[in-house]
């Protein structure tokens, strides 16, 4: 009796020829059971085609072929010739050639790219395929070309509708195991191929059997997604001396590992070298993304592929694969496997069949936007003229060059956006003058010099605190920041005849140790005394005050806002340029090559974050993410860090031309107090930097404006502004035991100019 057609575990056709070979009566009895099935008698047409290919020198006409067939069949019962084969899953009964004739005819168009002798040799080979998404195309291609006689297929998963973007099968196969579906399709191409399915997938208990049972595999094709299986199957294959081939469907990347020729070679070309074995047995969730990055060498994947990597778990659930790439991969793997099996290819390595590179526009892409420094930079001669035009100094204090250097050194340790250090100091006529150097503050974050003024205010505060510590009473004159000159302040250093306030001494002691600390914090609730100390530090700057956001719900909302703004900055062309090309120092440059910007190691807090930033470094990827509204994985670390912070301190000042300058002074005092209290701080100013741009929309596209408008409304609901005040600085404060890397500074001789007094 024929098998149940509704059984979705059946994948082998039923050969009836043994039952019907005795005589016609027996055949009629057996075939009667299948009369309600679809019967296709293909024997005669196949036999005629066989006659045709056996006469290559003479092009037989259809009439001649019919005559030869009729003569051959005259004394035979053709019903008893060849084989009758039943496919339970499709209810089809087929009459076809016997195995030898079938294989001869089906492979005849392979000659002589594959010789008959080679075809015979290949028919004795065994190939195993793990993973039947890309593996489906490989399996069908391998079977169609018939480069083996035995195929083992393993996959625990079933066909879903989303798989049909790359797996060529019908809707009727939804819900059926992938290797069952693949085996059925191969059986309908060639029922004589020996297929064995492992619908439970590959496990620790069956991997050895998959590789060796009924004869060792000649090639293992790995197309699975499971990292542990990907690693363990190679280790086993290496042990048994089985070569491994893998194709990733991105840039046509192909891996060949000839463990049959070199049992000592490291798996995956040594890309996992240095990772302890126990970490590769039970891979932690946080380690998976960086591990995938290493295995696929993510920086050499396509830009769309890298952009997609960042969207996994965000807007997509898994690695994307296109039918064109999967089809190409099936062909490439089949070709390489055939040549390995015929000893025509013996190398190991990683190879690319990159169609976008091979078939590309001949004209070069248009050059990317060039970001140049402003024409105007600091001009010492002009600065001296400005200084000399000021009213004369009233100070009788004699200040040594060494003291000036100490004061300015403290000033240069102030924070600045991108560690730009937009200051120049000129000591002349007994006074210290602070200039803004526009050539060092042309970042996207520095809209209308807001970021530069924050930095200059912080630098002035540092210098003033150090001057007080040295026994001087700094008397500061501010200059209109909208003036044509870049002079922002002059400091008259008067000998202090009284005692130095303890608060000034205390804060000055932490100028050298103040650092941006992005490390994860521990759960910590600020004491009232700590809040009061920070509040008092800010209050010393006239017109400034600080509020503390501590509620978990509000922190979570702020985390979402800050994360969205940081993402906007990173994906914006100009913001991307600032972060990746202008401000960040990547591995490979020596310590002496830079004194500004920040080392990437000081920014990242996890291997996964480093992997993400390495991908995003490509501007094409940033543009892709920006176009699809993606990249949310980039903001997750910020959201989590803000949500789990002890507080976000919001520094606000009275609205004026000097608002950001004063804000920088207040923010620096706050930060130094945070340092004194043994806490950690990180500025999170992206919202304020971008909100400044919303009035004009300059440098922003419609999508960015819409995002920022929405988050600004949310921000203003959380941050309550007093009348005539403006929030200018956001500082994340938490408790952490982890040390942070300090950013470098430019040499003092590049920022301080001590010029002899005029005569």
Image: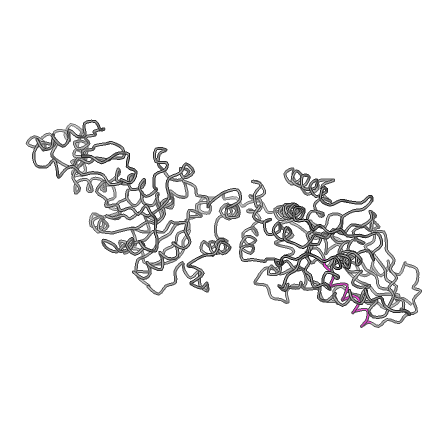
- Residue 668 versus residue 187 in the image, above or below: below
Q: Position of residue 20 (x, y in %)?
A: 11, 35
- Colour convention: one colour
Side (left or right) of 72 relative to 119: left
- Residue 78 versus residue 680 in the image, above or below: above
Q: Position of residue 314 (x, y in %)?
A: 53, 44
Instruction: State whether the magenta stretch is mostly helix, strand or loop.
Output: helix
Give me the residue at 93% from left, 62% from top. Answer: 392
Side (left or right) of 713 relative to 654: left
Count of numbered tags:
0
Report whether residue 572 is seen.
no
- Residue 512 versus residue 521 in the image, above or below: below
State the residue in front, 682 or 194.
Answer: 682
Is residue 408 part of the magenta span, yes or no?
A: yes
Q: Position of residue 737 (x, y in %)?
A: 63, 64
Report whether residue 210 is seen.
yes
Image quadrant in which you'd find residue 585: bottom right
Side (left or right) of 183 relative to 633: left
Image quadrant in which you'd find residue 582: bottom right
Side (left or right) of 391 relative to 730: right
Q: Which residues are magenta?
A: 401-415
Is residue 149 part of the magenta span, yes or no?
A: no
State the residue in front, 446 or 115.
Answer: 446
State the residue in front, 55 or 23.
Answer: 23
Q: Residue furthest left?
A: 75
Image quadrant in which you'd find residue 759: bottom right
Q: Quadrant of the N terminus?
A: top left
Q: Position of residue 355 (x, y in %)?
A: 43, 45
């Amino acid at each position: 009796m024929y098998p149940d057609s509704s059984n979705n575990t059946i994948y082998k056709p039923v050969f009836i020829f043994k039952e019907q070979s005795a005589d016609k009566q027996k055949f009629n009895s057996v075939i009667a059971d299948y009369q309600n099935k679809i019967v296709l008698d293909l024997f005669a047409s196949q036999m005629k085609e066989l006659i045709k290919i056996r006469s290559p020198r003479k092009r037989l006409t259809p009439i001649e072929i019919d005559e030869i067939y009729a003569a051959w069949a005259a004394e035979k019962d053709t019903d008893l010739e060849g084989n009758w084969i039943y496919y339970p899953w499709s209810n089809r009964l087929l009459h076809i050639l016997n195995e030898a004739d079938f294989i001869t005819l089906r492979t005849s168009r392979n000659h002589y790219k594959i010789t008959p002798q080679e075809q015979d040799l290949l028919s004795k080979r065994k190939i195993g395929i793990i993973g039947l998404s890309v593996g489906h195309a490989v399996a069908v291609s391998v079977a169609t070309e018939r480069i083996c006689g035995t195929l083992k297929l393993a996959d625990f998963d079933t066909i879903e509708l989303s798989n049909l973007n790359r797996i060529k099968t019908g809707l009727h196969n939804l819900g059926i195991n992938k290797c069952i579906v693949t085996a059925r399709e191969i059986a309908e191409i060639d029922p004589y191929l020996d297929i064995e399915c492992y619908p439970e997938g590959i496990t620790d208990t069956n991997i050895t059997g998959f590789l060796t049972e009924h004869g060792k595999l000649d090639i293992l094709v790995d197309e699975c997604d499971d990292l542990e299986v990907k690693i363990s199957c190679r280790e086993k294959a290496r042990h048994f001396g089985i070569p491994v081939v893998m194709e990733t469907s991105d840039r046509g990347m192909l891996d060949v590992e000839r463990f049959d020729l070199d049992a000592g070679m490291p798996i995956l070309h040594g890309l996992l070298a240095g990772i302890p074995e126990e970490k590769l047995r039970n891979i932690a969730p946080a380690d998976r993304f960086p591990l995938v990055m290493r295995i696929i060498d993510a920086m050499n994947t396509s830009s769309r592929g890298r952009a997609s990597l960042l969207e996994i778990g965000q807007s997509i659930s898994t690695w994307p694969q296109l039918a064109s790439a999967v089809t190409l991969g099936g062909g490439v793997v089949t070709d390489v496997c055939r040549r390995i099996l015929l000893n025509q290819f013996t190398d190991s390595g990683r190879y690319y069949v990159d169609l976008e590179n091979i078939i590309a526009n001949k004209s070069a892409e248009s050059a990317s936007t060039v970001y140049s420094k402003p024409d105007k930079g600091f001009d010492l001669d002009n600065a001296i003229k400005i200084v000399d035009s000021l009213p004369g100094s009233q100070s009788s204090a004699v200040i040594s060059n060494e003291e000036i250097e100490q004061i300015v050194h403290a000033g240069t340790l102030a924070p600045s956006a991108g560690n730009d250090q937009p200051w120049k100091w000129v000591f002349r006529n007994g006074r210290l003058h602070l200039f803004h150097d526009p050539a060092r503050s042309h970042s996207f974050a520095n809209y209308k010099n807001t970021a530069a003024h924050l930095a200059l205010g912080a630098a002035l505060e540092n210098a003033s605190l150090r001057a007080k510590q040295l026994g001087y009473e700094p008397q500061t004159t501010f200059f209109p920041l909208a003036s044509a000159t870049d002079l922002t302040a002059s400091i008259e250093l008067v000998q202090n005849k009284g005692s130095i306030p303890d608060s000034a001494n205390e804060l000055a002691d932490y100028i050298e140790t103040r650092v941006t600390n992005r490390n994860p914090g521990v759960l910590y609730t600020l004491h009232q005394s700590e809040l009061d100390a920070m509040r008092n530090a800010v209050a010393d700057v006239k017109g400034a005050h600080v509020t503390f956001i501590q509620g978990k719900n509000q922190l979570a909302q702020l985390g979402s806002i800050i994360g969205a703004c940081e993402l906007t900055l990173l994906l914006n062309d100009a913001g991307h340029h600032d972060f990746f090309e202008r401000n960040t120092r990547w591995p490979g440059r020596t310590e002496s090559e830079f004194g500004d910007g920040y080392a990437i190691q000081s920014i990242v807090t996890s291997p996964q974050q480093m992997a993400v930033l390495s991908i995003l470094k490509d501007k094409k990827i940033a543009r892709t993410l920006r176009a699809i509204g993606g990249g949310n994985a980039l903001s997750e670390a910020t959201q989590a860090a803000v949500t789990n912070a002890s507080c976000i301190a919001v520094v606000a000042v009275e609205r004026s031309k000097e608002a950001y300058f004063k804000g920088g002074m207040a923010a620096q005092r706050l930060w130094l107090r945070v340092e004194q209290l043994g806490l950690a701080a990180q500025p999170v100013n992206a919202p304020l930097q971008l909100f400044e741009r919303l009035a004009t929309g300059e440098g922003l596209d419609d999508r960015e404006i819409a995002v920022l408008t929405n988050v600004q409304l949310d921000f203003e609901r959380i941050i309550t502004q007093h009348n005539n005040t403006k929030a200018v600085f956001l500082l994340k404060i938490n408790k952490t035991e982890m040390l942070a890397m300090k950013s470098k500074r430019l040499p003092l001789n590049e920022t301080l100019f001590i010029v002899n007094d005029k005569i």
